[in-house]
Image (cartoon, rainbow, N blue to C red):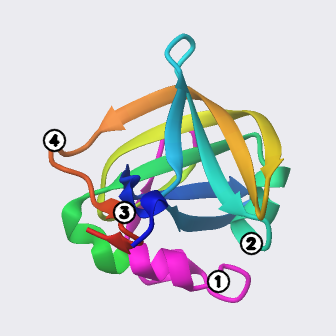
Amino acid sequence: MDALGKLYTSTAIVTVNVDGKMNGITVAWVTRVSWQPPMVAVSIGKTRYTRELLDKSDSFAVCILGKDAKEIAEYFGTVSGRTTDKFKKYSYTMSEGNLPIPEGTIAYLECEKAGRFEAGDHIVYVGTVRRQKLLKDEQPLLFGEHRLI
């Protein structure tokens, strides 16, 4: 185990909808970056299809997963949206801002993209939270020590 493994975070699926093409990717690197206005940052690998769609989109959703959503988290984190419509396997709803919210989500944040910057092999997207919704008041699925917990 290394020291970085001791950083625990909630596991989320970041979703986008670009001209009707929906995709999502499981991420563990999500953090608040501002109270006023409320803002978050998400880190997406440069080679990921969701990163390509995020560059074309003005908005994204951060869908925080519940403890029972480990299978969904693994699927959205390992299957590429370039070749597979991930939303055919799992049910979802659409948010007020027309972003997909997959099953297993206990809360979500609809964000307007405020900026992006490179960070090593990832791109960090900063979003201003425009809407948020708590669906279930329960503990989130965590990522720590390099695994889902």
Q: Position of residue 11 (x, y in %)?
A: 39, 58
Disc 3 vs disc 4: Cβ atoms closer than 8 Å? no
Q: Of callouts 1 and 4, which one flags the residue occurring earlier in the amino acid sequence?
A: 1
Residue type, mark 4 in image? Asp
Q: Report helix, strand or loop for mark 1.
A: loop
Residue type, mark 1 in image? Ser
Residue 63 shown left or right of residue 82 in the figure: left
Q: Mark 2 against mark 3, which lies toward the viewer?
A: 3
Residue type, mark 3 in image? Phe
Disc 2 vs disc 1: Cβ atoms closer than 8 Å? yes
Instruction: State which quadrant residue 136 falls in.
Output: top left
Q: Which residues are magenta?
A: 73-97
Instruction: Between residue 130 and residue 143, name the one nearer to us.
Output: 143
**Residue at 60%, 47% in the rendered image:** 42
Residue type, mark 2 in image? Tyr
| Name of the residue lying farthest toward the top | 36
| Name of the residue lying farthest toward the front | 2
**Residue at 54%, 10% in the rendered image:** 36
| Name of the residue lying farthest toward the left | 138
User: Where is mark 3, residue-wise?
Assistant: 143
Instruction: Between residue 5 and residue 103, name the one nearer to us.
Output: 5
User: Where is mark 2, residue-wise?
Assistant: 49
The Cα atoms of the two marked residues, 2 and 4, are separated by 31 Å
Q: Report helix, strand or loop for mark 2.
A: helix
Task: Sort mark 2 into few (<14), some (14-19) or many (20+) by Cα contacts within 10 Å.
Answer: some
User: Where is mark 4, residue-wise?
Assistant: 137
